[in-house]
Image: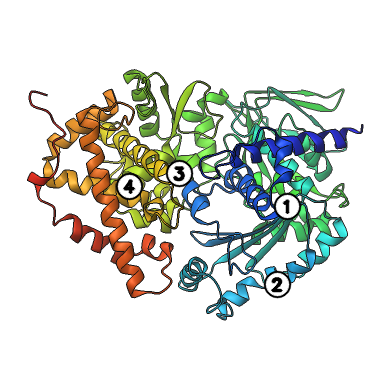
Amino acid sequence: MAKKEQKNDIFKNNMLEEMLKIANSDDMGYALKNPGDINSLPTKTKGTLFLKFYLNEIFQKLYNIDSDAIEQGIVDNANDKGIDFITIDDDKVYIIQAKYNSKPLKEIQDFINLPESIKTDLYKNTCNAELKAYFAEIKNKKNLEYNLFFVTNEKVTTEEEEYYTSLAKNENVQFSIIDSTKLRTDYESIKTMGDNPPDRIILNLGNEDVMELDTISPNETILITQKGSKLRSLYQNREYRERLFNLNIRQWLGKNTVNKGMIETIEKTPDKFFYYNNGITAICEDYYWNKEKQELSCTKFQVVNGAQTLTTIAKESESIDLSDVKVLIKIVKADKYTSGDKESSLAFNIVKNNNSQTVIKSIDFRSNDEIQIAIENKVKDYKLKYPLEYPMSKDIAYKRKRRLNELKKKTISMENIAKTYYSMFLNPPDIYLSSKKMWDITENGFYYKIFGVNGQKTNTITDEKFYKLFASYYIYSYIDIKIKDKLKTLSKDEYPPYYFKYHILWGINELLNIKYTDEQIIRIFKQIVSKGYYVNAQIHETKEHNFSIYFDKVQRFIISKVDEAKEDVENVAFRSLLTGDKFLKALRRRILEERAEDLPELIPDGE
């Protein structure tokens, strides 16, 4: 069997195994035994599994889309207008149409025309309520970029792809066909994301320009050029892929306006690429130039600026000749790879200053902040356990970087913590509208509201803030478990609290503030974080039972407010309620009707 066919078979099996997990999850409720059983399911079900596989295993990780946005954005039902998934991410709209075991290319023309159809209200009276809410939100934004993905597990020829891609003539519309080959290569790339950088890479300098900078000290630096064909081979080496970019704070952004310009230059005037492109900046722990073999050997090589350039070249079709494309690469012998976490290191500051031309909002960049390192250390020092598993035996690992989860530990990412803290203590609708503002350090951003003190930067974490951060996550996880239990007998649409987990979290905090002082609430949070009191649903003690009453109250309030909204609007969209202030204000008024003496006690006598 050819090597390429072997890769395809391995990927196909991996995909079916992931689809099997999704099918057997609580959400889908199947009990299939083998991956091959997927093929016996109804066509629509297989399509849903394929869509969720792509969203969860590839799309979310490549484009750093919020997990809740992934869950909320699936609109594959009646009157979906060919849209299986939609989400709005700041100034970008992502729309996906997924086809399992088919590639009806003739549908692509209407798919590409979606932005114009939304703009002209073509589907206003015929699309479902959820889509209508997204369309209304889109129309209220300016200068949006549309990213359209036609995803199929079938093979699409180069000629087919080029023809249909050429139909997207609007500069604000980026259209991509993700076929079986692209699915496999993206999936393989993601599997290396967050791994340690390559121990050593070899750059072939034959017929290239090379200059060691003798006057630059104390860190040796070398300038080289590389043909596009060599860079494509470098990236396509499955041992490298995303491992080349661990310290780069921006992942590949897809075929956006800038990258389309690169592609046009590559394909039409490749000999001009060197003049138009800024090149690549990389660091390494050490390098050795073998002049006899014309090879440059680099240890722990990391691209810190120019990921867009390298990835765009690498993702060009094999039919495109890249031998005339020349790229300038600056390689600096910095300190150790791990020093990319330390603000005093050259590695850290090269990363920072090579990405400071615009306001940085990336979660990857914030991961190196001293406050994040302080939180990580505190988790280790306190030896936190995960309280929603009985007995509390699983250790907590705080994940502040893009890396694989630690085996045998419960991983809690800084993204999880940021969302739950902001929702519980500030304003849950903001999470649905712009979760990336959580990493924005400007005056309008949320980052220092979450991880700072009074909205200002801090490098240390107090016990009080620590307990609030992790208690918010634990309580959210408790809410999630409660809701999943309800979904065993009810559908999502029959049980609205499914959509309002962050509102429930916020509502529980509102009730706590009615019952307790700030100091008492911190005592409760400390008990939750250190001992699992009140959230360990498998310990049927009084405290847990009392805490569940707080949950029950808020979820009942939400159900009643959703019912009221349905009386006002015939087909109410959950997204409209989730992102609107009106619903939250109505919920607050209802919560404030509660009296402290009617709320159950969470602090037993003598505790």
Instruction: Please name which of the two marks, 1 or 3, marks the residue nearer to the observer.
Output: 3
Do labels 2 and 3 touch, CB within 8 Å? no
Instruction: Please name which of the two marks, 2 or 3, marks the residue nearer to the observer.
Output: 3
Query: Which one is earlier in the sequence, the residue at label 4 or at label 1?
Result: 1
User: Residue 212 versus residue 592: which sits nearer the camera?
Assistant: 592
Query: Which one is earlier in the sequence, the residue at label 4 or at label 2?
Result: 2
Residue 525 shows in the view: yes
Instruction: Please name which of the two marks, 4 or 2, marks the residue nearer to the observer.
Output: 2
Query: Which one is earlier in the sequence, the residue at label 1 or at label 2?
Result: 1
User: Residue 269 versus residue 37: which sits nearer the camera?
Assistant: 37
Q: What's under tag 1, amino acid-wise?
A: Tyr
Instruction: Please name which of the two marks, 4 or 1, marks the residue nearer to the observer.
Output: 1
Disc 2 crowd rating (10 Å Cα; few below 14, some 14-19, many 20+) is few
**Residue at (16%, 34%) from the top-left corner?**
602
**Residue at (68%, 68%) from the top-left corner?**
111
Q: CA distance from mark 1 to mark 3?
A: 27 Å
Q: Which residue is mark 1?
A: 100
Instruction: Please name which of the two marks, 4 or 3, marks the residue nearer to the observer.
Output: 3
Q: CA distance from mark 1 to mark 2?
A: 19 Å
Q: Secondary structure at mark 2?
A: helix
Q: Which residue is mark 3?
A: 488
Query: Which one is earlier in the sequence, the residue at label 2 or at label 3?
Result: 2
Q: Which residue is mark 4?
A: 422
**Residue at (53%, 45%) from the top-left corner?**
355
